[in-house]
Amino acid sequence: MKSGNNPLPIEQNKKIKSFRFLGLFTILLLSLQSLATIHEGGDYDAGEAVFNNNCATCHSLDGSVLAAPSLEGISERWAGKDELIKLWIKNPKKAAATGDDYVLKMTATWVPKFQWMQNQAVNDADINNVLTYISEYEPPVSGPVEGGKDWYNEEAKAAEAGDPIFWYLILAVVFAIIAVAASGAGRAIGSSIQERETGDGIPHTSYGERAKVWLWENKVIASLLTLVIVIFFLIPWGYNLGMAINVMEDYKPEQPIEFNHKLHAGKNGINCEYCHNSASKSKHAGLPEPMLCMNCHKGVKVGESDEMTAEIHKIYDYVGFDPEAGTYIEDYVQKPITWNKVHNLPDHVYFNHSQHVNVAGLPCQQCHGPVDQEYMLGKVATSEEIMKLAEEDVNIISLEKDVLTMGWCIECHSKAGVSVMNSDNGYYQEIHDRLIDTELGKRDLKKYLEDNVITVKELGGWECSKCHY
């Protein structure tokens, strides 16, 4: 019998079967891993660089559609198609020619809107890296975090470090105490020595007299100290004092009729623009004429209290209406309601209501506060009220500056994000079209999108001529 036909020992046969099973298990595991992900082992940082250079101009990572579909969840959508996605990135039309159902469906949806994607000059390693970056991407924290601190706000950082003026004052007081103590100790020692040598001590003089003598004898040092005090204390104090002029948060003037905003805008749900009907049409929001009030109060003659009923009857006095008869008084000379202005910007400041209502889409509460919740009368909102609203409503931007100051507007323009891609707003769509029309514009757009937010500031919202004549 040939040796090749000899049966193997039982133990050796078991080992061979074990090795075969281990090999099949390894192959199966590797196959499952290749199906589970198409970017295993990619470099996150390298992928970020590829994304910023090649993808960020058109694609977002947060689900929003910019100049192309979002890349969020791309690994799951292309699972098991690792070679096809590489072909798609390098040559989209060639990938579509394969007839793959997913690719054909995607091109039918997006190509009519955005045209074909350009062939990308990247290799397989670049694709692996960028897919790793997209899969593991976490958006940066740009809002308030624990403790209400905004770590991306430079002023919050400065506040965290403490007000330098306060510490300068503390140091000045400490040095003053040390100087007085040293002066007193030196004078006592000098007086003791003189008394021992001459029998007479140093004559007593007040601190003021001694200070005059010291200042006269040390003119240069005194001048430098005066300059330091002026620069570090008096100038900042005067600046802050000047910036506070006519900044009147919570200002609430008396009105000819105590209009209840909480009742009308809150409980009854009347839209702000029903009374302020030019807010979306012109620079000014406008104030209601008496006859506008009569659209409702011709029928609503009694308020929730006697005081409210008395306010309703004031309207009748302005327009000449007889509530008992339900008719207007003949030949009555109607009078306008002279409302007292709540907000009054300087003449050199330009503000347009329609631009902020239509273009920016800001809710009225962003500037005027919770008019539908608390205000019995119109008044200037406080920054605390705006910040509280921002915690409750994602459409309100949290602002820390005094309301209606220049710093407040600047802060808002640096935080407010706008969408310029495929926007229904013609103004922003025009900006987008101009940006993608040139290579320089594309670079600017990519830079703006580094934090996934295009702010009003980045689109020129900090230019002086935007707000000043």
Image (spheres, rainbow, N blue to C red):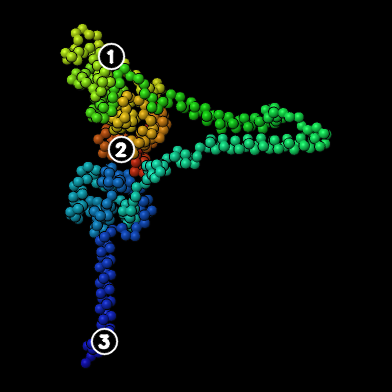
Q: Quadrant of the N terminus?
A: bottom left
Q: Quadrant of the C terminus?
A: top left
Marking on residue 393: 2
Marking on residue 267: none
Q: Helix or strand or loop: what does disc 2 sit on? A: loop
Q: Nearer the viewer, residue 89 or 22?
A: 22
Rendered location of residue 452, percent (x, y): 34, 43
Q: Can see residue 409?
A: no
Mark 1, other Cα within 10 Å: few <14 / some 14–19 / many ≥20: few
Residue drawn at the location 19% of the way across and 53% of the way down = 102
Residue drawn at the location 57% of the way across and 37% of the way down = 170
Q: Nearer the viewer, mark 1 or mark 3?
A: 1
How far apart are labels 1 and 3 at the CA level?
A: 114 Å
Q: Helix or strand or loop: what does disc 1 sit on? A: loop
At label 2, which amino acid type do we have? Asp
Rendered location of residue 184, percent (x, y): 70, 35
At label 1, which amino acid type do we have? Pro
Q: Quadrant of residue 194?
A: top right
Q: Which residue is mark 3?
A: 9
Q: Which residue is mark 1?
A: 336
Label located before the other in sequence (1 or 2): 1
Rendered location of residue 160, percent (x, y): 47, 41
